[in-house]
Amino acid sequence: MAPSFDFVDWWNKEQHQGTPVVVKMENPNYTMVEIESPKTGFEGGKDKGKNAKQLTWVLLLRAHRAAGCVAWVALGLWTVLAAIKKRLILRQGLADPNLERPSKGRLFKAITGFLVFAIFMLCVEVAAHLKGWHFAGPQWPPAFGVQNLPHAIYVGWIYFRAEYIAPPLQFLINFCIYLFLLQSADRIILCLGCLWIKWKNIKPIPVNPSLKSDDVEQPDKGYPMVLVQIPMCNEREVYEQSIGAVCQLDWPRHRMLVQVLDDSDDVDTQFLIKGEVAKWNQKGVNIIYRHRTNRTGYKAGNLKSAMNCAYVKDYEFVTIFDADFQPKADFLKCTVPHFRDNPELGLVQARWSFVNKDENLLTRLQNINLSFHFEVEQQVNGVFINFFGFNGTAGVWRIKALEECGGWLERTTVEDMDVAVRAHLCGWKFIFLNDVRSLCELPESYETFRKQQHRWHSGPMQLFRLCLPDIIESKVSTWKKVNMIFLFFLLRKLILPFYSFTLFCVILPVTMFVPEAQLPVWVVCYIPALMSFLNVLPAPRSFPFLIPYLLFENTMSVTKFNAMISGLFQLSSAHEWVVTKKTGRSSEADLLSLQETKPPLKLSRGVSESGLDALKQRQEQMHPPPPPLVPTAPIPKKKANRLYRKELSLAFLLLTAAARSLLSAKGVHFYFLLFQGISFLVVGLDLIGEQVS
């Protein structure tokens, strides 16, 4: 018989001396506990009862925190289940189905067919598991009959998938892994370049930063003529704050002209914008209002029409701000000096900052993506190769560069990237200023964000088809051609959405039903976690959202993949242009500082000095409204949600694959599929971001 060993008996026999240990808990859920090493063992007395009671309290407090976490998870799960019941089953709180175009494209049909096949195969695999048909290779039954027919069919399926499905699937897996590693290497190189810039403190410095003139009679002669353009279309929520911010730029007024380029088809919005322009015109600002009756070419057509004005020839630079941008007063003084004594410079791009980045989970995740885009991608490309994609706003162009490369063209939905590529092929250089920032808004609803991302990912593929011959035939160096074709377009605009959707939303679920093809754990878990960590580095306050960011990026891959395909093959959806919806949020700190420094200039949205308020007061005096009998509360707007069928189909597909992975005992794959499926479900039910009113 083996000798028994009791740890407590051994401890009591030995005399242990030790130093008292004091554990201090700053969290109010804990107490201060003093634990002394026993001198006489655990033999009765007050010390034994005291220590046992204190340890019990600590364990109870920790159990309370664990129960709180479990309750939080249960509450989130209950919210998702309640949303499924309300929106999928009862069809409550949804937008008008007549206004929502059903998703019946080829991609949706393919996902739905794959989902039906996966559910069927899950039932077959569960039945085979209950029957005990577990073997490493095909084992045919000893005799064929009606009873052995299901067994024979199942064995035939195993043989067929092992011989004919697994090899091509494994080849596709290896190909996607190669693309994944290639893109990951590009991401790591960009991060190393950004680290080098930070370490060496590399910043673009103007050759001659002074704008002052030596002429005493004309001290502002050193300031070049600048044209500021604000293109907008039905921007009722943001027109006032953007026009107000631009009109207060610190620049000699006789050396600057503001063009408000209004494409609005709403008569009331046109009237309000005209009044705002008239207000600032009365204050002495050189500002004009332009309206097109035919919105041909969208934003590109609007800018092209404005540049055809005869007075544009008197200006040397043009600055563009979208309708939701609020530049600081020193924007021009921080950007324009870089052009002086630098004749090869064609563009100076400033960074965006966001007034609503902490509004909800969707805006936080967007802030992570765009912070990496500006801090790493734009800055590294600007420092080392003097080329990057123009962001369409918050940038200053040399008008000569625009004219030399052909100006604004209406052939794609990414006119900003189009003009940047053509200017680079003409030999112009770009500078990115990471320290100069302009306030703007992030989309707060998933519907708005999804349409924006569709335009941003379909347009580059349209442009790639059109620009490829020009890139090959251009006179730039071979290195610039390789960088533009393989890095700028193929790797970052085509390969990224392709492998992200194919690998994690298609191949991974398929491998659960074809276990002969293997997808390594480091591809599913470790490399994506490292890439997400690198993406979050430029926004360190967003580290708690690392896992949601990883899941959300894979969730958005279906939208980006669909947009990339539509742009590459010139589908009808590639030519859609939807103006990003704005909410009109302003930076409260900036508005307060403006009111303190310049009391007469009030930028609150309700104020207008163009005569509209006086007219309204006169009408109220002539026809006073009857006094209300009782105070009436404002009627809240009824909010509605949409159902995104591609995302919902993928959610159920991934959850089905997660259930199948339990039969194969693949732990990491199960958890990834489970949480990724829940992420698709949350997005498909429109539970992320602000609801669409």
Image (cartoon, rainbow, N blue to C red):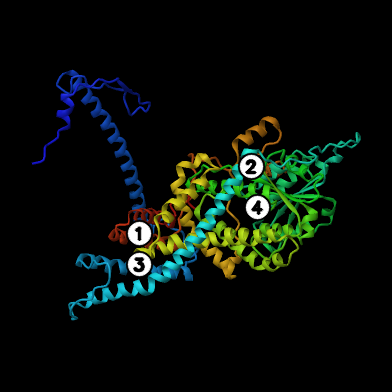
Q: Where is residue 189 in the image (x, y as percent from the top left)?
A: 58, 50
Badge number at residue 84: none
Amino acid type, mark 3: Val
**SS at mark 3 in the image:** loop
Upstream in the sequence, badge 3 or badge 1?
3
Q: Nearer the viewer, mark 1 or mark 2?
A: 2
Upstream in the sequence, badge 4 or badge 1?
4
Q: Label 1 crowding class (10 Å Cα cut-off): few <14, some 14-19, many 20+?
A: many
Circle 4 is placed at which residue position?
A: 391
**SS at mark 1 in the image:** helix
Upstream in the sequence, badge 1 or badge 2?
2
Q: Considering depth in this image, is 540 or 285 the residue closer to the camera? A: 540
- Please give left or right for residue 531 compared with residue 256 in the image: left
Circle 1 is placed at which residue position?
A: 655
Badge number at residue 197: 2
Upstream in the sequence, badge 2 or badge 3?
2
**SS at mark 4 in the image:** loop
Mark 4 to mark 2: distance in Å?
21 Å
Mark 3 to mark 4: distance in Å?
44 Å
Mark 3 to mark 1: distance in Å?
16 Å
Badge number at residue 514: 3
Mark 4 to mark 1: distance in Å?
38 Å
Mark 1 to mark 2: distance in Å?
44 Å
Upstream in the sequence, badge 3 or badge 4?
4
Amino acid type, mark 1: Leu
